[in-house]
Amino acid sequence: MQVLRRGMNGIPQDIVAGADSLLGTPAINENRWPYSWLEPRFNTQYKQPVASIAIPAISASFTEVLALKVPSGFRFVLRSIMHTFQSSIAGQFVDGSGELLWTINVDQPVGIPNFSGFGLPDLSNMAEQRGSLRDGPWQLEGYTVFDAYQIIRYNIRNVSSGAAGAPNFTTCGLFGWLEPLLDTSRDS
């Protein structure tokens, strides 16, 4: 069995036992304030994708506005969202009417049967705008963290709105940061 020695007179330590003793400790989980899902740490990369499309035609299915794939070696911490309706014609959409529905889901492509994906709790079939272009994004509370290779999609569905096509647009955004899975910055 391989051992590490701490100096000439140190007690040998089993590598596997040493690594196993760290599991479940703050050294690995960082499960203490400031929590990594509330405050970005050193070495994080802000990610703020925003996209706009013309309101789609009335349909039974969703239309993808924005997709974010979490890259290898990272987690994505989602802190805020934004979806808005813009039009140069007054009275085209009423918040809460249910004519337009926005959904954020994970690993659930549009038009493909749902085998492993899921809609985010309280962020599916949202009938009102959240956040605004003027006032900024809508803050999320709690732990909303996604693993490498997961794809977060922002979709819209036109249920019954006559506001399809230009000059009627929706803008959607995901706001947060990418956190390295292995942070070696503390080792130096």
Image (cartoon, helix red, strand yellow):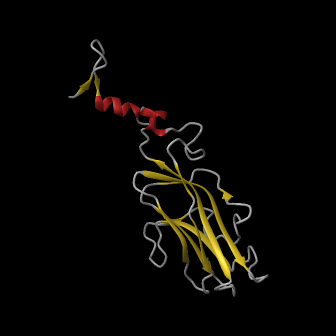
Q: Is residue 85 left or right of residue 105?
A: right
Q: Is any part of residue 25 visible from this angle?
A: no
Residue 100 in the image, given as x and y percentages of width and height: 66, 78
Identify the residue at the far left of this view. 1
Q: Residue at x 57, y 41 (%)?
A: 35
Residue 46 in the image, given as x and y percentages of width and height: 55, 53
Q: Nearer the viewer, residue 30 or 133?
A: 133
Residue 107 in the image, given as x and y percentages of width and height: 46, 66
Q: Nearer the viewer, residue 145 or 41?
A: 41
Q: Is any part of residue 9 visible from this angle?
A: yes
Q: Quadrant of residue 123?
A: bottom right
Q: Does residue 47 lie above or below 44 as drawn? A: below
Q: Is residue 51 left or right of residue 27?
A: right
Q: Quadrant of the C terminus?
A: top left
Q: Nearer the viewer, residue 76 or 123?
A: 76
Q: Does residue 50 lie above or below 100 as drawn? A: above
Q: Quadrant of the N terminus?
A: top left
Q: Nearer the viewer, residue 28 or 71?
A: 71
Q: Residue at x 40, y 51 (%)?
A: 73
Identify the residue at the far right of this view. 90
Q: Does residue 85 lie above or below 92 as drawn? A: above
Q: For the image shown, how many numbered marks are present on the structure?
A: 0
Residue 160 in the image, given as x and y percentages of width and height: 67, 85
Q: Residue at x 49, y 44 (%)?
A: 43
Q: Residue at x 62, y 72 (%)?
A: 102
Q: Does residue 184 lie above or below 106 as drawn? A: above
